[in-house]
Each structure stands twice: as C-alpha cells, then as structure tokens.
Image: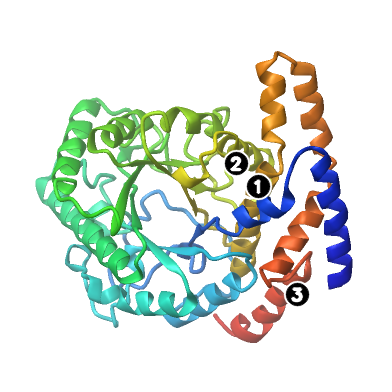
C-alpha cells in the first residue's frame, strides 16, 4: 500500500472512531511515547558472553528450537538488535542480563563484575538512542546447580549470590546515571525443588535475610529502580519455588520496590490482567514481562492474542500506562530471532493501541448507569473497527515499514548478515 492509500485509509478510520468519541490523532501521540524494554537474550538463546563452566545446569531456563543464526558475539548481537529496532515504531529500551558483559575473554566470575564490563553497551545505547535495563543472572552457573542461590542453606553459596546481586544493582545505578534514565534492575532466581520440600519456611527465611542485606543499600530513583519476579513453578522446581507471588508481594511492599508480573508465571487459568488494578492500589509502579505461555511458561514470541489485549485494556482503562514499565521476556529458537523480536514488539504496541482506541468515557458511562447491554454491544462493535488503518498510519509516521513490508527486510538481513553463522 502506498503512502496516499495509507493516508486515505487513516482519514476514513479517523472519522469512524470519531463517531465513538475517540481521537485517533491523540492515540497516535500517546502510543509514540510508549517505551518497551526488548530482551537481549532472545538473540543468542540466553547464552551470554561469559567464559565459565559450560556444564553448569541451565537453572530452569530451557531454550528450545534449532533455528540457525544465533548471535555468537556482542558485535553480532548488537547488529541484530539494531536491525530489529529499525523495524519497530517508537523509541525503546534494551534489557540486559549480567552475563552479556564485554569480558574480553577473561574468566570474570559473577561476584566480581563491575560497570567496566558494560561501558561498551552504554556507548552503543547512546549511539542507538536507547535506554538500558539490567538483570542479575542467578542461573546457569556451577553455584546454582543445587537448585538454590539466595535461599541456599550453604552460607558460602548465599554470600556469592548476594555479592553478585549487590554488584548488579550498582551497575544498574551507573547505567541510569550515564543514560540519564532510571535503569530497572529485575531479580529472578531459580530457587526451588523438583520434589516434596519439607523445610520451605527455612528457605524463605534465608531468602528474606539475603534480600534484607541486598536492599539495605539504597540508590536514587532517578538512577535505578528495583523489581522482584515471582514464579509458580519451573523446570526442576515443580514442587516448590522459594520466590512465590505471595513472598515477593510481601518483599515489594516491605521494601517499597516493584513487583514484576510475568505473563507466563501464573496458573494458565489465572488472569494476569486482573492483578494489575490490585497491585497498583498499594504500589506506585510495577514491572510487566510480556510473554506468551502456550503451555504455561513456555516463553513463545508474543502475538496479539486475547491475553495480550486483555492485559493492556486493563492498564489503559485504569489510566495506568505511566505506572507500568513494559518489558519483553521470551526466548524462541524455533524461528528467526530478529523476526521474533519484531513480531513481539509490534504486537505489544498493537495491543496498547487497541486499548487506547476504546471509547473509555462512553463505556464507563454505560457501566455507571447500569446499561450493561449498551456496554457489551459497544465492545462488540469495536471488534470490527478499522484498527489496522490506524496502525499503518502510526508506522508511517514513525518511519518504519507498514503492513507486511518488514518481513522481507528480516529475510534479506538473514541472507546477508547471518546466513553464514554456524
């Protein structure tokens, strides 16, 4: 579709949405300010660039698929990321794990990392007009092989991981200062057991003590913000997870930090969307990990499905966009990895746009007056509105490919840049 057709289609869509009381120009303005933190770890299947024991247990992180062309070096990963961002409308962020430092081939253990190993990423981010977020990496390491890190009964193990997380928070604050944007540091640990665990209380007591020490040091909110991420169960922790939802809710309220809500970390029948309006009654902000759990936490590339739509409808209906930090969290080695990023980012932005295009005032009026028929009827009518025309116009305004044109760009990049990777 050429530019004139996109503009004509948008003009028609704008008139139709105006009949519902929706200002599509305002929607596009708001969407252009939505910033999503894209997950670096999809580009290389969560391998990172350390030089440590490759026999370490994966710690519940299982990447499936054998699609060729994963990034093998920082240069390759940055090249792949740059290509992906060029196909995504808006200004966004990059989410780094600690294992992605530029270690220069040296064997730097995780309790010894410093900001020096991430200065290259900061320089790259400045050049790409990106901001950075950061995560401690408490898995895929010999000192995580027991299944326990910060909640281990072995004090030496706990001390190692406490030091690692402390350093990650310091690095996050450094990143935030350098890029003049708060760096969100998210903490997820794989601690748990495959089978029946008798002493759950002690493991959680030790985890609380570890977190008390870690969060005893404060950083300015304009430099970094903390989040803790719960899980229902995982690979190798099917019977017990120390960092449960209830546990981290308590930590978040006690420490006045964010809860991280991962879409794949709850029971399949639970509504992730329904948690948003409850948590934000008691917390100023939260971190959202957007994923697609086909079979629970299976971390598929994100698509515009009902779960995603429901999530952002809840956020927009509550006027909560400015209080929710959005990040992606998936790793899918069954498809082209750049394509996986672009599908996921564009789908997430589409979900936000779809929610913004609701006539919220009219729907609330129907609800407040008890006119539930009109409420339901209007929601149904919205399903056939020309959403795609508004999306194409948004992409045109943001100077990225419209429609399916980006697909050929990904395939061309694959042939030119990653076809020879082993």
Of residue 28 and residue 46, the one placed in the foreground of this image is 28
Q: Residue at x 77, y 31 (%)?
A: 379
Q: Estimate the spatial distance between the alpha carbons at disc 2 and disc 1, rounded to whole Å.
A: 6 Å
Q: Is residue 255 left or right of residue 352?
A: left
Q: Residue at x 52, y 44 (%)?
A: 321
Q: Is residue 301 visible?
A: no
Q: Tell which circle, 1 or 3, labels the residue nearer the N-terminal end.
A: 1
Q: Is residue 184 above or below residue 197?
A: below
Of residue 40 and residue 374, the one placed in the foreground of this image is 374
Query: For the residue labelled by badge 1, is the local secondary structure a helix, a strand or a loop?
Result: helix
Q: Is residue 342 visible?
A: yes
Q: Is residue 38 left or right of residue 366?
A: left
According to the image, label 3 marks what residue? 408
| Foreground label between 1 and 3 | 1
Q: Which mark is residue 312?
A: 2
Q: Residue at x 65, y 60 (%)?
A: 343
* Residue 94, quarter of picture: bottom left
Q: How is the image coloured?
A: rainbow
According to the image, label 1 marks what residue? 351
Q: Residue at x 59, y 39 (%)?
A: 316
Label 3: how many Cα within 10 Å (few below 14, some 14–19, many 20+): few
């Amino acid at each position: 579709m050429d530019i004139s057709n996109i503009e004509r289609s948008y003009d028609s869509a704008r008139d139709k949405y105006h009949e519902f009381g929706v200002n599509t120009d305002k929607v596009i303005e708001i969407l252009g300010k939505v910033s999503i933190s894209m997950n670096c770890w999809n580009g290389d299947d969560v391998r990172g660039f350390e030089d440590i024991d490759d026999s370490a247990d994966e710690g519940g992180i299982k990447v499936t698929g054998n699609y060729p062309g994963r990034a093998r070096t920082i240069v390759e990963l940055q090249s792949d990321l740059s290509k992906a961002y060029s196909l995504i409308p808006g200004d966004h962020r990059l989410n780094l794990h600690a294992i992605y430092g530029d270690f220069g081939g040296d064997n730097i253990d995780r309790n010894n990392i410093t900001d020096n190993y991430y200065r290259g990423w900061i320089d790259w981010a400045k050049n790409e007009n990106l901001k950075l977020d950061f995560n401690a990496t408490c898995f895929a390491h010999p000192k995580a092989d027991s299944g326990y890190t910060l909640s281990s009964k072995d004090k030496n193990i706990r001390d190692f991981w406490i030091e690692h997380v402390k350093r990650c928070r310091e690095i996050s604050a450094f990143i935030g200062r350098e890029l003049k944007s708060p760096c969100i540091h998210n903490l997820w640990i794989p601690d748990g057991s495959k089978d029946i665990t008798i002493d759950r209380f002690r493991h959680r007591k030790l985890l609380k003590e570890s977190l008390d020490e870690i969060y005893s040091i404060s950083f300015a909110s304009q430099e970094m913000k903390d989040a803790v991420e719960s899980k229902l169960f995982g690979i190798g922790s099917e019977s017990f997870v120390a960092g449960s939802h209830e546990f981290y809710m308590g930590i978040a309220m006690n420490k006045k930090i964010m809860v991280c809500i991962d879409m794949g970390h709850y029971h399949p029948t639970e509504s992730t969307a329904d948690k948003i309006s409850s948590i934000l009654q008691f917390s100023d902000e939260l971190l959202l990990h957007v994923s697609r759990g086909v079979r629970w936490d299976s971390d598929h590339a994100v698509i515009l499905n009902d779960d995603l739509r429901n999530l952002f409808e809840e956020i927009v209906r509550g006027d909560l966009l400015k209080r929710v930090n959005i990040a992606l969290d998936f790793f899918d080695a069954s498809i082209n990895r750049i394509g996986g990023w672009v599908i996921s980012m564009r789908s997430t932005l589409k979900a936000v746009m779809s929610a913004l295009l609701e006539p919220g005032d009219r729907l609330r009026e129907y609800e407040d007056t008890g006119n539930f028929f009109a409420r339901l009827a209007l929601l149904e009518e919205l399903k056939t509105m020309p959403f795609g025309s508004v999306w194409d116009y948004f992409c045109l305004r943001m100077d990225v490919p419209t429609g399916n044109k980006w697909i050929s760009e990904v395939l061309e990049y694959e042939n030119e840049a990653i076809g020879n990777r082993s």
